[in-house]
Amino acid sequence: MLNYIWAGLIVSSFVFALGYDVRDLSSDKYRNGQPLPVVLAFPQGYDAAARRVPVEVRIDPREYASFYRTKQSPDSSYSGYLLQTREGVQVRLAAGSKLPEPLATIGKVSKSRDDELQGRLVGFTPPAAKAGVVFEPVRFVKLNAIATAALDFAKTGAEIAIGLIGVLALFLGILKIAEDAGIVFALVKLVRPILRPLFPDVPPDHPALGMIALNLTATVFGLGNAATPFGIKAMEELQTLNPSEDTATNAMVMLLAINTAALQLVPPVLLLALMGTQINTLIFPILTTTVLGLIVAIVAARLLGRLPGYRATDPNRNA
Amino acid sequence: METARNAISLLSFFVLPAILVGFPLYGLYKRVPVYESFVEGAKDGFHVAVRIIPYLVAILFAIAMFRASGAMEAMTRALDPVLGLIGFPAELLPMAIIRSLSGSGSAALVVDMINQYGEDSILVKMAAVMYGSSETTFYVIAVYFGAVNIRKTRHAVPAGLLADAAAMIIAVWTVRLLYG
């Protein structure tokens, strides 16, 4: 299933990105190669010999709307400068200008080294104020975006994992003490009546049950930092019971399903920060939803495991 | 409800110190060489983190591409009429889809919706309950199964997604029941 979802995400993102890009090209959304009419004003006067001339660029909202066939309208004026070279005159709008769409998207492609929106000035005959600006052609924005996103998040993935090293080391160390001191074993005896029905394949005295109990305790109290190392340790314990190297057992799927349901009595810190005092009205619905979600997760993990297709791949099927 | 919440959040302040201090202390009492044990266990931290990198990268880059492609908007439009039938607001569909895929993405959606509708709107309440009552299924799968090199996930994905879908619908219903 994960194979198909994974491939589906990648293929569908390519198909949709291509579809949007072809639509933009065929509707000429970015008016590639056509000059956008602008009015120039020179606060310090125009000097034909100067390389840089400060300029105020005004775009008439009505002209903008009909040029790009959009409802968005530009600010009253944008400050920038003209760059006069032998090849022609360029106009650059200061970086950080609040540009309307689609000019904002164009600005991501047609930009100078300093992230200024940059275009070629055409039809400019000083001292006349009217001129046109031609930007770099914008094509395949979405295709470019999905490629950039893939690269960015590959980096993020590694960063998340590397960022976990310290916390993992801390809690795996603490857990080793707990094992050596017999705390895990004591915990196993304590939680056996509750957890055994959920994990029937785990032997009654196995430390995995203790690790699962610690994982669930941390989750319930909203201690995400601790819950992850405990959960990983629980998975490692379950893996010692797994006759296969790369296939999940029913117990592993159950542990995962319980974790994805995120049973917690304390709402996530982030939600507290976002919602402020409103959070008080949400405690009860969150609790109800998470408990019912947990029940669905447990039932689904148990029942789906009985389907013939999944039973055939069970690593414990011969046991 | 509020006192219960305060009691729980107060208690949750003590759980972590109890583990961090209590375990080594009990270890000492049991004559465990606590420092040596700790270092022995902590050694695995690096290996586990490195082991999950390929799994995390695989999941995160595929989801990032999907989000950047605009496929979500198209899906929202396509599913809109179906959702009307079960009383699910169309504004919440992006949240329902992204919740299982990306934790940061769904948090960003909550922020967007707060800016758009305000904290006390019922839609934001529903989105917040969705965010608070579910975990990012694909992230959990990558981390937990990645740590033990499990590649064949069997029914983990369908079970997780079924639970997510149920939680999304239940979130809408409970909030509507209470504040609708």
Image (cartoon, coloured by chain):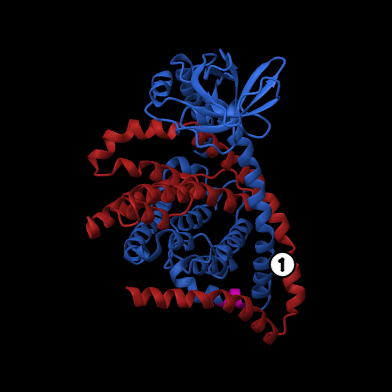
Q: Is residue B71 above or below residue B174?
A: above
- B160 and B125: which one is in front? B125
Identify the colour of chain A in the image: blue
Main SS, magenta region, reads helix
The residue located at (46%, 26%) in the rendering is A59
Please give the letter of the chain rendered in red: B
The residue located at (49%, 33%) in the rendering is A99
Residue B117 lies, in percent from the top left, at 33, 49
Does residue B159 show up? no
Residue A252 lies, in percent from the top left, at 53, 54
Task: Indicate the chain on which mark 1 is placed.
Answer: B
Task: Give amino acid for label 1.
Answer: Gly
- A285 and A129: which one is in front? A129
- A143 and A81: which one is in front? A81
In this figure, which residue is indicated by the disc labeled 1? B41
The residue located at (52%, 20%) in the rendering is A129
Residue A283 lies, in percent from the top left, at 35, 65
Q: Is residue A162 left or right of residue B179?
A: right
The residue located at (45%, 34%) in the rendering is A75
